[in-house]
Amino acid sequence: MTTKNMKIELLDKAIEYANNVVEGKEITTWEVKKQCEIFLDDYYNRQKDINFEFFFSKKKISKINKLLKLLNFATGFVEGKQVLENLSGFQAFFIANIFGWRYKHKSYKFRYNDITLFIARKNAKTALIAIVFILLMLTEQKYSEFYSICLTKELSAEIKKGMEQIINASPYIKKYFKISSTKTGSIKCLLTDSFFEPRTSESGKNNSIRPSAFVSDEHGNFNENSNFNAMKSGQKNVLNPLVFRTTTAYAINNSIMEEDLDYIRAVLKGVITDERQFALVYYAEEEHLWDDIGIYQANPLRIEENYETIRKDRDIAKVKLSTKEEYLTKSMNVFVQENKYEAYMDIGLWKQCKEDDIDFNGKEVVVGVDGSISLDLTSVSIMYKENNEYYCMSHGFLPSGNMDERREKINYYDMQSRGYCDIHKGMTVNYNKLEEYIRNIEDKYNCKIKCIISDPFNMKQTMENLAHDYEVILLRQTFGNLTVATKAFRDEVYNKKVHYLKNELLDWCVSNATLNYGKSGDVMLAKDKALKNKKRIDMLATLIFCMTQLYIEEEKYNAVEALLNNTDW
């Protein structure tokens, strides 16, 4: 691999890493192996095909190679050392793929425009992204804008700090940059008149910028997409836009990164075709969370001192519950549910029950209804039981007039566009629309309503109207009324006997639910008290309402009753 007899070290490192992964010399994930297989096939075979849109530009990578020789690391075990010589295999592979792959007829244009690095902490993630953005500032068109977004000011400053350290440690390029002295100030490249600026993800703050590239740093800490999407929308008129996601896992419910990972995996499996996605996904597989294989899978920066620290953390986490969450998320890079040990449902097991379609045709269904005035989420659920398995769906209702008052970070308009809820005009839920929805269930799904069960709160008039045509059961939310159904529904989910129509709003409600304990082991659903005004559980609650009518607890054997009922004695 030479261009005019010059060895292209970066490419050599990238190819070596890919080969080691594919041949099993590197312990890693199936996702990384697949990305390496794609690279090798594209490099050696597909780019020769006239119909393949992309090629690997040795000219471009040669320029990057030269620039990397001018950069020095600033911290860690490689402090003061040249970047190119000291890049690890996965780092070289990451950089080579970003800068090397181009369109055949537009060599200025990157092939990969959606790039993800999912990796455990202490693997030089920040330094790697800092290097990438320095290279972009030096090589992309004049007057380009580059940004990072993060949840807090402190976190948003990390990439800027990493760039500043590398620039200051690199005398050959330092003179071409002007760095603001403030933590969240800009970095300007005097050669290209480009700048980099860290930003927070405050609502409405990122709507008027024009990023050539941006990185959503600690992307896994977000539970809604509004600011990420605002940044992307600012790229519509950008010549060569790039989007980066970089993150470690978090103990958070409903992280947007989990959905992103689902998409990434679908692409890597060939379910979805997306030639412009590149992702390196490092994490410990479930069966390796507590062994060294998991350590190597989640931590590709091969530094033995780091591994020894992780092993010590692992030993502590095995016996000290308070450290388990930190170990699993930050060292093994796996998401765990927020307040996992208090949660009503394991969200991972719940999502295994998701179906793309539920057939209600000809079924006798129970309808559960939970009303609200304004800020709660009004919900209707439909459920039937067949062969001791439960089939269900939920739908939400809310008013548009108080949308600005809601503290939960949910894009309800997006949820409505996906068919998960209805938004009505006004400050309160339109109960006429709610009643209309319920009355249309039989015709819409060609089913028969067995009964409607509802919390009487705010529902008196609506239920009186419906009672003329349907059996209506008013169910107050008490331990006595709900304990059996609450426990049974979770058990049936864990036994994979529940099937629900996919609904991300319902998933969110399930992830928010904790348990309120009464006497003698009685339970009811509850919301996390600290986040009460930011969470909703209503769409799950109505499924529990349905369960009260469909679940029949097995009769328990009573020795005394059996004796008294025995006529042969």
Image (tube, rainbow, N blue to C red):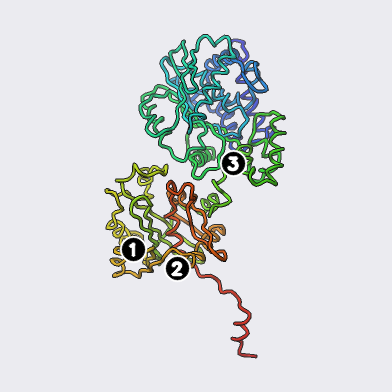
Separation of disc 2 and disc 1 at Cα? 18 Å
Residue 447, percent from left and from top: 37, 64
Quadrant for residue 2, please give it: top right
How many residues crowd mark 1 within 10 Å: few (<14), some (14–19), many (20+)?
some
Nearer to me, 502 or 53 = 502
Q: Are marks 3 and 2 in contact (CB under 8 Å)?
A: no
Residue at label 2?
549
Judge the density around disc 3: few (<14), some (14-19), many (≥20) Cα neighbours within 10 Å. many
Give coordinates of residue 257: x percent, y percent: 50, 39
Q: Locate residue 320: give its quadrant.
A: top right
Q: Quick check: marks 3 and 1 in contact, CB under 8 Å? A: no
User: Which residue was labeled with disc 1?
Assistant: 442
Mark 3 vs 1, N-terminal side: 3
Q: Answer few, some or many: residues within 10 Å of disc 2's Cα (few below 14, many 20 plus, some between 14 and 19).
A: some
Asked if disc 2 and disc 1 are in contact, CB closer than 8 Å, the reply is no
Label 3 sits on residue: 334
Precedes in sequence: disc 3 or disc 2:
3
Residue at left offset 61%, top offset 27%: 124
Image quarter (top left, top right, bottom left or bottom right) of the N terminus: top right
Q: Nearer the viewer, residue 19 or 278?
A: 278
Q: Amino acid at mark 3?
A: Val
Element at label 1: helix
Q: CA distance from mark 3 to mark 2?
A: 38 Å
Of helix, strand and loop, which one carries label 3? loop
Task: Judge whether 68 appears above or below 354 on screen.
Answer: above
**Quadrant placement of the C terminus:** bottom right
